[in-house]
Image (tube, rainbow, N blue to C red):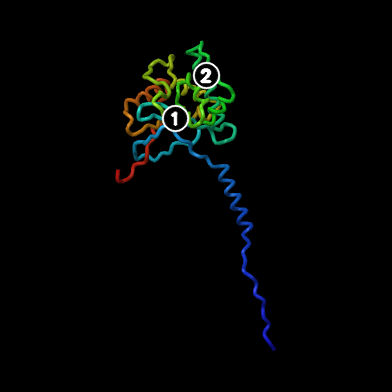
Amino acid sequence: MGKVKIKKKETRIDMTAMSDVTVLLLTFFMLTSTFLQKEPVTVITPPSVSEEKVPDSNLLSVLVSPEGKVFLEVLGSKDSTMKSETVRADLLKNMVAEYKKSHPSANLAFTNKEMETFSKLNAFGVPITKMKEWLNLEPDQRDKFLESEQNPGIPINMNEDPNNPNEFQMWVRAAYNSVNPELQESMVKGRGIAIKADQTTPYSVVNVVMDNLQTMKMNKFTLMTALKTEEE
């Protein structure tokens, strides 16, 4: 009796389910990822041995360029109600109120479109009187102006009078009065304010920033550094 031949079946793996999972994962990461925005100036922080991480939410960062110009970055919470865009829009509204306390006759107002543009900016650093004009520039022109010699950054000086704040102190106070209570609490505890200065920036320049914060009774803040290697 002859042997029964078993028909060979083609070996095939159905990849349809795997493709579906891949697409879902890709979509998830695209929707949840946060892309780093370009900073107005390149800052190389000095090295140190500290490994404490700066928080990535509820944070007011003070960026000091090698030339001594001051810029600010504001981050809100990661939840949907107090996200960065909401906090920044509220920040600009508070800044207008702070500025008018010292300059009651100032004609300072922003449209809803300008408020929305500001809320989407990670970093800024122009005098408040130039803010409206700056916000109405094209994105590439805004970046060029921040980097240009014509831009003085946020006005700041040695100020020992808390009743007569400069613009930097007004911005800090506006952030402290934020609609987001978590940002306010973080600033009080010292985790919510970080100073990021270039390693070539003179200490006297950084000292002006620290002096302004201390005048406002904000004595706790973080100095951002890069982790020092064994060779250093």
Crowd band around label 1 with a 10 angstrom C-alpha radius: few (<14), some (14–19), many (20+): few
Residue placed furthest toward the top: 105
Residue with the most extreme bottom position: 1
Residue 221 appears anywhere in the view: no
Question: Disc 2 or 1, which lies upstream in sequence?
Answer: 2
Secondary structure type for disc 1: helix
Instruction: Identify the residue at image location x=59%, y=35%.
Output: 80
Which percent across, then down, holds residue 156? 40, 21
User: Counting other residues with Cα less than 10 Å from the Cα at mark 2, is it few (<14), some (14-19), or many (20 or more)?
Assistant: many
Closer to the observer: label 2 or label 1? Answer: 1
Q: Quadrant of the N terminus?
A: bottom right
Above/below status of 27 relative to 194? below
Task: Give the residue at mark 1.
Answer: 144
Residue in the foreground of this view, choosing between 216 and 93: 93
Q: Nearer the viewer, residue 222 or 95?
A: 95
Quadrant position of residue 219: top left
Vertical relation: 60 (above or below) 215:
below
Q: CA distance from mark 2 to mark 1?
A: 25 Å
Residue 72, image x, y percentages: 45, 28
- Residue 148, horizontal then vertical, whole percent: 41, 27
Question: Mark 2 — residue?
Answer: 96
Residue 18 image point, x, y percent: 60, 56
Q: Secondary structure at mark 2?
A: helix
Query: At label 1, which amino acid type do we have?
Result: Lys
